[in-house]
Amino acid sequence: MAKLPAKVERVPWVTDGSIEAEAETLFALWQKDHGEVAEPPVPVDDMIELQLNMRYEIDDLQKRFGHGDVLGAIWFNEQLIRVDRSLDPVEHPRMLGRYRFTLAHEIGHWQLHRRVFLRDETQMSLTSAADAAAFVCRSTDQAREEVQANTFAAFLLMPRDLIRRAWIKWRGTDDVVCVLDFDASTSPGSVKARQDAAMQRFSKPLAERFHVSAEAMTYRLEALGLLTRDRSLFG
Amino acid sequence: MSKKQPAFGEFIREKRLAKGYSLRKFAELIDVSPTYLSLVEQGKVESPPTAERVRRMAEVLGENPDELMSLAGRMPEDLPGIIRSEPEEMPQLLRAAMGLTADQLKALAKHAKKLQKEGH
């Protein structure tokens, strides 16, 4: 069988730990300059303009790029982040989680990738048109820099300490919750669907407080070992 | 689109940042959507914000409303009525005052106020 050519990545591999450290550093800097964030949500809107001093615009990106799945983009040289107006959380309240995740994702590109990109500036300017964004972020893109920016976004929007504190305040303890223990076998659907529904029951209250989607919160709670669907991990 | 709008948008952006308001926060304070405010800042709206809205922006930013109004390409809403109240003399006065310096205009306004106090 012919071997597939190796995919050429634009950014180096880094551990999730160092991505979390980048997110935690930005959050710490924000709190040092603007006071402690004792309660969620993490103010990502404010961070772009007031901490990173970047330009921030909401625009019709679908028109600008000519396809419908671009939600955010970053221009490194102009220090500019743009998000698509379909995400405006005032015009479209149910997009709030998506809006904030997109902002945090673009901040991730700035924190993680600007050095790589700016070093490459001369090369890039040879190949890109005047209005071309450095990274145009599509929801379906699985390139390494997009995955890293998503990882960063989760860490920034849901900082470890803030989550743990909120969880303890709500549950009264940091004991792990296993959804198997709460699975009502009378409810309809497959085992997987019932588990997903049970997971969301536990992630939703926190998701609402952190202004993120229930899916994003579920992943984060699982990663922090506060919520699990599989008791065998502990058995 | 008015030529003044890009300057207006940039002015608003600078002033709100100086006050420490993010786009979303300032939009909330003046009761518009973040998208609308951003388009105003980019000079991309068809017509400038309403006089009432510009007044609200001036209030939140602590800026002179008349100045902001002119930068936005809006005439303060009381002016057309004032001009129409004396359709001959008022335009004459304004044309006569054209080209005077700001200080001369201030002196003229002071004199007008004095006349008003003394009664007609």
Image (cartoon, coloured by chain):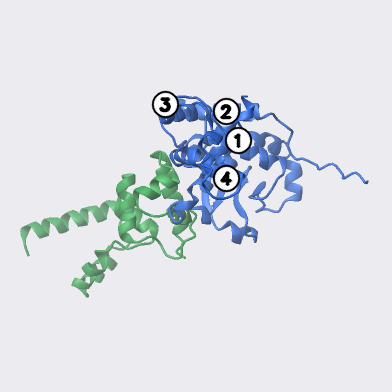
Disc sitting over residue B5 in the figure: none
Q: Where's residue A170, x and y in %?
A: 42, 31
What residue is shown with label 1? A152
Q: Is residue B44 above or below residue A116?
A: below
Q: CA distance from mark 2 to mark 4?
A: 36 Å
Q: Is residue A39 above or below residue B24?
A: above
Q: CA distance from mark 3 to mark 4?
A: 42 Å
Q: Residue at x 34, y 55 (%)?
A: B54
Which chain is indicated by disc 4? A
Q: Is residue B31 above or below residue B78?
A: above
Which chain is indicated by disc 2? A
Q: Amino acid at mark 3?
A: Gly
Q: Nearer the viewer, mark 2 or mark 4?
A: 2
Q: CA distance from mark 1 to mark 4?
A: 18 Å
What residue is shown with label 3? A172
> How dense is the environment of label 2, judged by Cα within 10 Å: few (below 14), some, or many (20 and up)?
some
Q: CA distance from mark 1 to mark 2?
A: 19 Å
Give the drawing colour for chain A: blue
Q: Which quadrant of the view contains residue B77?
A: bottom left
Q: Earlier in the sequence, mark 1 or mark 2?
A: 1
Disc sitting over residue A80 in the figure: 4
Q: Earlier in the sequence, mark 2 or mark 4?
A: 4
Q: CA distance from mark 3 to mark 2?
A: 16 Å
Give the drawing colour for chain B: green
Which structural element holds mark 4? strand
Q: Where's residue A171, x and y in %?
A: 43, 29
Q: Is residue B22 left or right of residue A13?
A: left
Q: Is residue A73 left or right of residue A165?
A: right
